[in-house]
Image: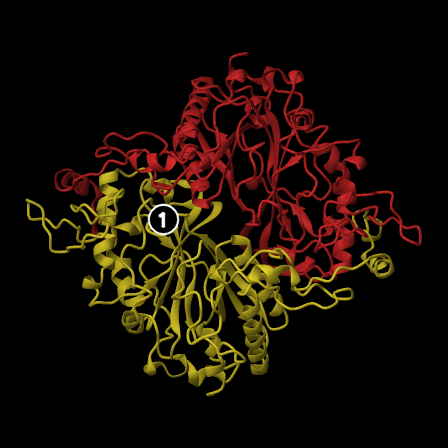
Chain colours: A yellow, B red
Amino acid sequence: MSRADDPQVPGRRRFFASAAGAVAVTAIGPAARAAAAAAASDIEPFWGMHQGGIATPQQAHAYVAAFDLTTAKRADVIGLLRAWTTAAARLTRGLPVAASTDDSGAEPADSGEALGLPARRLTITFGFGADLFIKGDVDRYRLAQSRPEALIDLPRFNGDKLIPERTGGDLCVQACADDPQVAFHAVRQLARLAYSAAKMRWAQAGFVPSYSKQETPRNLMGFKDGTMNVPVNNRALMDQFVWVGAEGGWMRHGSYLVARPIRIALEHWDRMKLGFQEQVVGRHKRSGAPLGREYETDALDLDATDSDGNPRIPENSHARLAAPESNDGAQVLRRPYSYDNGLSFTAERWPPWRQGMEFDAGLLFVCYQRDPRTGFVKIFDKMSKFDMMNQFVTHVGGGLFACPSGAAEGGYIGQTLFEIA
Amino acid sequence: MSRADDPQVPGRRRFFASAAGAVAVTAIGPAARAAAAAAASDIEPFWGMHQGGIATPQQAHAYVAAFDLTTAKRADVIGLLRAWTTAAARLTRGLPVAASTDDSGAEPADSGEALGLPARRLTITFGFGADLFIKGDVDRYRLAQSRPEALIDLPRFNGDKLIPERTGGDLCVQACADDPQVAFHAVRQLARLAYSAAKMRWAQAGFVPSYSKQETPRNLMGFKDGTMNVPVNNRALMDQFVWVGAEGGWMRHGSYLVARPIRIALEHWDRMKLGFQEQVVGRHKRSGAPLGREYETDALDLDATDSDGNPRIPENSHARLAAPESNDGAQVLRRPYSYDNGLSFTAERWPPWRQGMEFDAGLLFVCYQRDPRTGFVKIFDKMSKFDMMNQFVTHVGGGLFACPSGAAEGGYIGQTLFEIA
C-alpha cells in the first residue's frame, strides 16, 4: 500500500492550511506557572557560586542524561550553553522553558507536561566529559589545552561491563526534582534546545523512597544507604572533599561528577541469608548499625574483633572498603538513586549462572568530588577488586564529568572555560 | 583463572560458617512498620468485594508486571494465588511480606527496601491472561472451560508493534502506590514467592505528575489527560462500565484490565505547531477546553462548527474518536501513567523517518472495563485506524487480563474461578 492510500495518513499539510483559520490558538505563556513559582520554598536557587544539585538536599527523583555534540563549531557550543543556562534558570523557578507570546505559527516553546506544576525543588547540573576537550586526537573546539588534569579517562575497573550506548558523552545533565515528570520535562526541554548542536546519548531515571528527613533511605538491597556521607552544611568538609579549589583553574568552585548505573542482581541477592547479606555490607540490615553495634550512628570501628579475634567488620565488606579510614581519608559526596528499567535478558555472572528475564534495576550511583583521582578512583579501585558486594553488582555505564562553577545572573555555565581559552 | 584462585570470590560457604558464631543477627520483623501502618489514612483496603487499584483514586506511581507460569500443576497455581493474597494483604498495610521470627539461618522473608515506610496507599491488583486458561491447545490447569467469553484474544489493531517480550503473560500484577520503591518492592516480593511456580515476563513502571487533586494531570504530550472518565464514586456508572455483573459468572464483581505501554515519538511531537497539536487532540493545550471553548469542563460538543461550517472538533481528532458519543456510549475507566525507560534506538514510523537514540517514553495506558469487547476493543478499533494521534504513538506491548473479584479475609484472589471448576 502506498502512503497516499494509507488511511493512517491524515494529510498533515492540508491540515495546517485549514487550522490557521479554524482554530482559536491558545498561547502557552508563563502565567499559569507564575503563581506556583511564588511559592519560594519550593524553589532551589539557580544562580550562584556553585551549581545546584550538588550540595542541595537530595530530591526524590533524578533524570541523568548525556549528550554528544554534533556541531563542529566552538561558537555553537557556547551558544548551547548560553541557551541551556537561560532555560535552566527559568525551569528551576517553575516557569516554562521560554516565555511564549504567540505560538500560533510555531512549535510550542515548552512541551507542556509540567505546565501548572510548581518548581518541585528542580535543580539542573551541567557537566563536561573528556570528549568535549579532545575526542580521539581531534581538538574540535580549541579546548584541548584546557582539559583539567583531574578530568582523567576513568580506568577500566575490575568487573566493569560498560555498555557503550549507556556510557560517556560530551555533555551531561543531572536534573533532580521532587516530581519525576518535572525532572523529565527539564531534560526534554534542554534536548530540544540542543537539536542543532547535540543529541542525547543516554539517559537514566532514578528515585529515592519517601522516608522522612530523619531517616536514611534504603536502597534496593534493602540496606540503609547514606549513613556516612560528607555533610553538605559543613563548609570546611565540602571545600576539602567536594568543591574544586584554586588548584582547578577554570574549574574552581565546580565539582567532578561520577554517575554510574549499577545493576544489582536482585534475584541472586534475595536468595542470600540475612547473616551473609550483613557480612557483605558490614552493617545490620534492619538498624543500619555497624556489625555488632546497636545504632546506625554508632562509629564504624574497623579494629573491633569478636571473641575469636576475627574482625567484626569483615575485611572485604562494603562498609570497610568504602570507609575513609581504609582510603587514606578519601571521601566523596554521594547522591545515589534507585533505578528500575523493567526487565531485560541477563546472564548472571555468578553461580548458579542463571539466565533469563531479570530485573534491570539497581543503583544509579552519583557522587561529587574535588578530584576523582583522590575521590572515586582512589576508593573504587580497591572496592572493585575486593568488595564482596561485587558478586551482586555490575557497573553498566555512566561516566565522569567536570561540572564547572555556577553562573552569576547574566552569565552562563561554562563561561570560565570558554573565556580563558 | 579458576574460581578458587579468583580474588573476587570471597568463599561464601566459609563465610556462613563463621558468621553464625560471630554475628548478632537482627531479625527483620514487623515492628518497625507497625507504627507507620497505624496511620490508617495511608492504607487502602485490601479485602472486599472488589480488588483495590481499580476504583482507588489514582496513586502517583505504578509498577505493572506480567508472569508466565512454569508449573504444570493446578494445585501450584492455587498455592501461588493463596500466597500472593496473603502477601498482598500484608504489604498493602505497610507490613513486610511475612513476619520473620528468626532470619539467622534463612533468606530474609522480605527484601527490605520498604522497611520503615508506611503503606503509601499501596494497592495490588491481580489479573489472569488468556494463556492461564488455555495455552496453544493445552489446558494446563483444567481451566479451559472457565475461560470467560469476554477474555478474548485481543485483535491485531492497526499500527500495533507489539514486542513479544513486553506482551502477554499468564498472570498480571498491578502495584500502585504514592512511592515508587513501595510499588517496586511489592512486585519484587510477589516475584520471590513465585520462584517455584512462575517467572516474570515483563514489567513497566509509570508515574503521574504531582498536580493537586483538583487538577487533571498532564501526560507527556503536554495535554491534560483524564478530563472525561468514569467517575469512580458513581456506583451506577461503575456497575454499568467497569464491574462485571451477573453475566460474568465467576468474574462477577471483577473487571477487565487492558494495560499497554504506548511509546510517544516525543521528538516528532515536539516539532509540531501548537495549532496542529490541538487539532490532533481536539482540545486546547493550556486550558484543556474542547476546541473553541474556554474551560476544561465545557461539554465536548461534537456538532459545533466554525464559520466555514467545518467541525470545531476535527473528524479524526483523538477527543472525538474517544468520546462515548462516537462509540455508542462505550466508556472505560482509565488509570494511565507516564513512563520513561531512558533512550532506545528507534526508527520513527513517519516522515522524516528519523532514526537514532530517542526517548523510550510515553504513556502506560491502563484501563478497566466490564467487557473489553464493548470497552477498549470497541473504542480503540476505530481509533487505531483514524486517530490523527497515531502518527505519534505506537503500542509496543501489554495485554488483556481478567481481574477477578476481591477476596474476603481468609479467602484468596481467584477462588471463584478455581472452586467452580
**Residue at 45% over, 58% down:** A163
Q: Label 1: how many residues lie within 10 Å, few (<14), some (14-19) or many (20+)?
A: many
Q: Is residue B142 visible?
A: no
Most distant residue in the bottom direction? A420
Front-most of B420 and B42?
Answer: B42
Q: Across the whole image, how many numbered discs are drawn on residues?
A: 1
Q: Position of residue B410 (x, y in %)?
A: 42, 18
Q: Quadrant of residue A335?
A: bottom left
Q: Quadrant of residue B38?
A: top left
Most distant residue in the top direction? B420
Q: Position of residue A308 (x, y in %)?
A: 6, 45
Q: What's the amino acid at mark 1?
A: Asn
Q: Position of residue B310 (x, y in %)?
A: 90, 50
**Residue at 73% over, 62% down:** A27
Q: On the rendered structure, is B279 left or right of A316? A: right
Q: Position of residue B182 (x, y in %)?
A: 43, 41
Give the secondary structure at mark 1.
loop
Name the subunit of mark 1: A
Q: Does residue B113 sit above or below B417 in this rendering?
A: below
Front-most of A375 and B336?
Answer: B336
Front-most of A320 and B17?
Answer: A320
Q: Which residue is identified by label 1?
A: A219
Q: On the rendered structure, is B129 left or right of B87? A: right
Q: Is residue B290 visible?
A: yes
